[in-house]
Image (cartoon, helix red, strand yellow):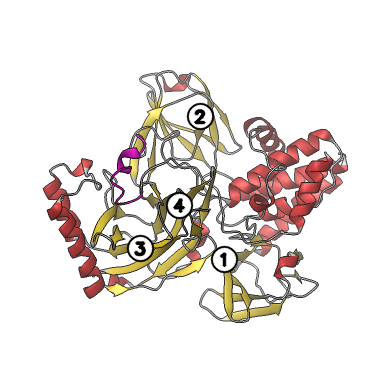
């Protein structure tokens, strides 16, 4: 027990340390242009079963809401991933998400589930149903369901553990896209000593600036942050930007509901350890139910890190809840991230597998040979997207996205991603050109026509004519298109443009640095 407490206490030193190393789940696949390894791509990434083969690090607003617990023989599940409708057989204890559709010929009601509070099914007909999730509008009514949520967490998430994690893992940024309570103190770690924290409105106007000395404490309300508003916050040394992210302040109504629930826990006739754990559970529960309005996982994390728990059951539950915090912080692009755009734009993050560790990182991360990665992106507009790898050694451009049956059409807030590739050699800088338009991209249309089978486009086996098309597209974008400036925010990069420019072509270059062998 002492080892676990020691680890938690050590993590206090790095509380709010903004790490660019976040976790997700991927499979191995080749780097663009690597002829020897390009067929290492695992089956299933391109449209087979999605249970283990395709990326399944769910975004923060896509929490597990149900599990299959019986009657699944002969049942299939479909869901949309990367803009593609994917299908697989149902399995025992399979995790389900809102919008998943299950099909079992003439007997769908025989399939059994465990549900999170406020989740259920909508029966379409005798053979199919949809998983639904409908939290109540009145947040004050959810407190009575905290006990049920706690019970499910004990059973369904017992494999998630946090207490034995390394300090590097525990340094993930709990305040990325978090919501703050206006009158609650925030304690920044000693690593920020000598740096300056800056809060800005989304339009860029500076609201607050403070040099963090020996007492790095901030009260959002006293810093001029207004309840219900979203801000950019930055960490700077002088004028050098070290970190930028979004942060929100709870609305007065939501703040009142949260405080009342925490106060109610204090009045319950349970032990001090049980009160600490129940508060942490409640904060995660309310964050899962209302992700676009409330994200208090950071506070759940902070409460647990400060706790000196004595009861074995409480310590065990704390371990699971910390694991859920880490999983949450590793959630990739979230709906809240789109607040930074304010105009047509795109958010980009990199899914990385490195030395067995899987995480999301910013495009500015320093990669190494043999790291596997996948580019994830989401737009806030409908249109068309192409990603090209610029192979300077061969003097050509290779198509990275779309691949196979993914198609290049993009929709607002729908995650798209590339195949997974590997870095090799180095040190070097790998360059990727992103091209967007509201209109169909003629070079891709022609590529599909000449491939002869639109749904089976193989981007690793393009012939000379097809490769020339990719070069034509890259040159057309750079010569006639509008170049966009890449900005960085937490574990993401983002660009913005205008409706007018999107009627033509816009483009930007993303550079990934391969530092060679570690």
- Residue topped by disc 1: 246
Say if residue 137 shows up in the picture.
no
Specify few, some or many for label 4: CA neighbours under 10 Å numbering under 14, 14-19, or 20 or more. Answer: some
Classify residue 384 by image quadrant: bottom left
Q: Is residue 369 above or below residue 242?
A: above
User: Please, what secondary structure does the residue beneath circle 2 have?
Assistant: loop
The dot on residue 431 is 3
- Towards the viewer: 37 or 229: 37
Tell me which secondary structure the magenta stretch mostly adopts: loop
Nearer the N terminus, badge 3 or badge 2? Answer: 2
Image position of 358 (left or right of 106): right
Q: In front of the other: label 3 or label 2? A: 3
User: Please, what secondary structure does the residue beneath circle 4 have?
Assistant: loop
Which residues lie in the magenta part? 31-43
Q: Is residue 178 above or below residue 67?
A: below
Nearer the N terminus, badge 4 or badge 2? Answer: 2
Image spot of residue 388 (x, y percent): 29, 59
- Towards the viewer: 53 or 438: 53
- Residue topped by disc 4: 369
Nearer the N terminus, badge 3 or badge 4? Answer: 4
Task: Indicate yes or no whether the magenta region holds residue 205.
Answer: no
Specify few, some or many for label 2: CA neighbours under 10 Å numbering under 14, 14-19, or 20 or more. Answer: some
Image position of 497 (left or right of 313): left
Q: In front of the other: label 1 or label 3? A: 3
User: Please, what secondary structure does the residue beneath circle 3 have?
Assistant: strand
Specify few, some or many for label 1: CA neighbours under 10 Å numbering under 14, 14-19, or 20 or more. Answer: many
State the separation of the CA atoms marked 4 and 2: 35 Å
Image spot of residue 457 (x, y percent): 21, 44
Residue at 73 percent of width and 72 percent of height: 193
State the separation of the CA atoms marked 1 and 4: 32 Å
Nearer the N terminus, badge 1 or badge 3? Answer: 1
- Residue topped by disc 2: 94
């Amino acid at each position: 027990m002492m080892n676990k407490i020691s680890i938690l206490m050590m993590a206090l030193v790095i509380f709010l340390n903004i790490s660019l190393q976040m976790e997700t789940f991927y499979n191995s696949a080749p780097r663009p242009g690597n002829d020897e390894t390009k067929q290492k791509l695992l089956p299933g990434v391109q449209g087979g079963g999605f249970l283990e083969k395709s990326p399944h690090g769910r975004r923060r607003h896509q929490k597990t809401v149900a599990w299959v617990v019986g009657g699944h023989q002969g049942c299939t599940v479909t869901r949309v991933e990367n803009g593609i409708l994917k299908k697989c057989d149902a399995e025992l204890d399979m995790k389900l998400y809102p919008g998943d559709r299950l099909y079992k010929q003439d007997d769908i009601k025989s399939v059994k589930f465990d549900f999170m509070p406020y989740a259920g099914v909508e029966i379409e007909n005798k053979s199919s149903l949809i998983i639904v999730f409908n939290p109540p509008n009145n947040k004050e009514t959810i407190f009575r369901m905290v006990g049920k949520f706690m019970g499910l967490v004990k059973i369904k998430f017992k494999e998630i553990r946090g207490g034995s994690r390394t300090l590097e893992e525990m340094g993930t940024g709990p305040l990325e896209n978090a919501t703050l309570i206006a009158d609650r103190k925030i304690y920044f770690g000693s690593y920020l000593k000598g740096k300056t924290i800056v809060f800005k409105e989304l339009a860029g106007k500076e609201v607050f600036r403070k040099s963090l000395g020996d007492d790095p404490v901030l009260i959002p309300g006293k810093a001029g942050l207004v309840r219900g508003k979203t801000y950019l916050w930055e960490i700077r040394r002088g004028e050098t930007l070290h970190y930028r992210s979004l942060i929100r302040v709870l609305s007065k109504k939501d703040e009142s509901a949260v405080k009342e629930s925490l106060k109610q826990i204090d009045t319950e006739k349970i032990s001090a350890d049980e009160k600490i754990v129940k508060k942490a559970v409640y904060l995660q529960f309310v964050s899962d139910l209302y992700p676009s309005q409330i994200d208090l996982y950071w506070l759940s994390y902070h409460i647990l890190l400060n706790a000196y728990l004595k009861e074995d059951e409480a310590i065990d539950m704390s371990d699971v809840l910390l694991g859920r915090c880490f999983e949450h912080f590793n959630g990739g692009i979230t709906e809240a991230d789109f607040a930074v755009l304010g105009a047509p734009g795109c958010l980009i993050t990199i899914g990385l597998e490195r030395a067995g560790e899987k995480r999301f990182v910013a495009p500015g991360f320093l990669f190494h040979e043999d790291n596997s990665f996948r580019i994830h992106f989401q737009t806030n507009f409908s249109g068309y997207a192409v990603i090209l790898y610029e192979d300077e050694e061969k003097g050509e451009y290779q198509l990275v996205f779309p691949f196979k049956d993914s198609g290049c059409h993009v929709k607002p807030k729908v995650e798209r991603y590339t195949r997974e590739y590997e870095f090799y050699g180095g040190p070097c800088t790998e360059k990727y050109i992103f091209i967007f338009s509201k209109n169909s991209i003629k070079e891709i249309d022609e590529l599909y026509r000449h491939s002869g089978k639109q749904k089976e486009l193989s981007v690793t086996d393009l012939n000379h004519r097809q490769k020339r098309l990719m070069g034509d597209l890259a040159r057309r974008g750079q010569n006639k298109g509008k170049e966009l400036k890449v900005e960085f925010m937490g574990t993401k990069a983002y660009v913005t443009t205008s409706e007018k420019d999107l009627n033509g072509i816009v483009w930007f270059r993303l550079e990934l640095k391969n530092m060679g062998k570690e």
